Image (tube, helix red, strand yellow):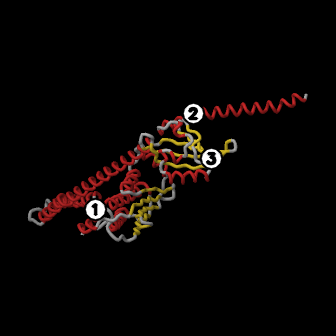
Amino acid sequence: MKKELLKQPEKKHRTAEAALKISEMRYRRLFETAQDGILILNAESGKIDDVNPFLTKMLGYSREQMLGHKLWDIVPFKDVEKTKADFRDLQSESYIRYEDVPLETKDGRPINVEFVSNVYHVNGDKVIQCNIRDITIRRQTEVRLKEYNRKFQTLSRRLVEAQESERRSIARELHDEIGQALVLMQFNLQAMLQMPGTVKLKPRLDQTLAVIDRLMEQVQDISLNLRPSILDDLGLEPALHWYTQRQAALLGLKITFQVDPLEHRLDAVIETECFRIAQEALTNVVRHAKAGAVTVELHIREGKLHLRVRDDGIGFNVAPAHEKALHGASLGLLSMEERAVLAGGMLEFKSKPGKGTEVHAWFPLKWQTQALRSKAA
């Protein structure tokens, strides 16, 4: 009986040893086959106790060239003072993560890594495990993507500028050529009415004059909608004031315009995109909102230009509408967002069914250069 009692602790000890060996074997297998670099440091001295094959391959150093050396003694971590400072952080914190650490391989190739450290206690000793992931390709891809986005925005801005220039040209053509031709026709027909022997023609001449009057109004409306000259001549604030008053008169809407006076003319792209967003927002109010009152605000807050267009209409669910817009149901919402981004700003919609809608766009407060202001003057 006593022998059996003595054997039980011994059996438990052997079982614990076997479990520990299995655990160590599993850890070693994971350590050897991991697809990230793993570095084990002595938490007191900073010496490298172990490295896995993936890290030696990543950095180009053999295991023997790294073991026993302090972290700041090997070339990839050659910025000694910074590495020592980082090591002190590793000693004091149980978890540290560095998103982008520049390193250099043995053959002099620069790489970027993600560096994560955890502190453990193993057999009474404090060790630091550092997981090192090569993110060089990811960083290069991000840099290329930023460059592509920059080029895309530059191209988009040029396309918008070309579009606005074409609008300006067509608007001027309508006003100067077609508008003047219609005025001449109107003048000649009125002169004919004064001529003897045209009494029988008067009904037709009056009818033709009425058609010309309508055509002149339509030409003027098209010209103004294409590119209001007041935007080029006087700037954003007068253009928005004129446009809101015009829409209120035409549509019977109560439109309130509130503005912080602008010190100078804004950058031409910001003026154009801000005006177009307000124009599209008011168009949407007329088409969909069933509103009785609208407020248009232009304010400067915290170094940014803010445009808000609020209505008291029926409102809508923003998320589903935006999702439909992404699938081509409506270009209005996306067009306003794109215009804001092209001008270096952002845009958001706030709306709920029955609660009205607010379109809020904000832009960097970028003024025209002195040379352009002098030219405009």
Residue 138 visible, this angle: no
Q: Judging from the image, what secondary structure is the residue with disc 2 in?
A: helix
Query: Looking at the image, which is closer to me, 359 or 67?
Result: 67
Mark 2: few, some, or many residues within 10 Å (few <14, many ≥20)?
A: some
Residue position marked by numbered label 1 in the rendering: 228
Neighbour tally class for label 1: few under 14, some 14-19, many 20 plus, Cα within 10 Å: many
Mark 2 or mark 3: name the one nearer the start of the chain: 2
The Cα atoms of the two marked residues, 1 and 2, are separated by 70 Å
- Cα gap from disc 2 to disc 3, whole angstroms: 20 Å
Residue 98 picture location, percent across and down: 52, 49
Amino acid on which the number 2 mark rests in the picture: Glu
Q: Nearer the viewer, residue 285 or 99?
A: 99
Q: Reply above or below: 220 against 44.
A: below
State how many labels appear.
3
Does label 3 or label 1 sit earlier along the sequence?
Answer: 3
Residue 111: x percent and y percent?
A: 44, 43
The residue tagged 2 is 32
Determine crowd level at label 3: few under 14, some 14-19, many 20+ residues with C-alpha closer than 10 A: many
Amino acid at pointer 1: Pro
Q: Position of residue 6 (x, y in %)?
A: 86, 31
- Give the residue at mark 3: 119
Mark 1 falls on what kind of element?
Answer: loop
Q: Nearer the viewer, mark 1 or mark 2?
A: 2
What residue is drawn where x is 31% and y is 53%? 157
CA distance separating discs 3 and 1: 67 Å
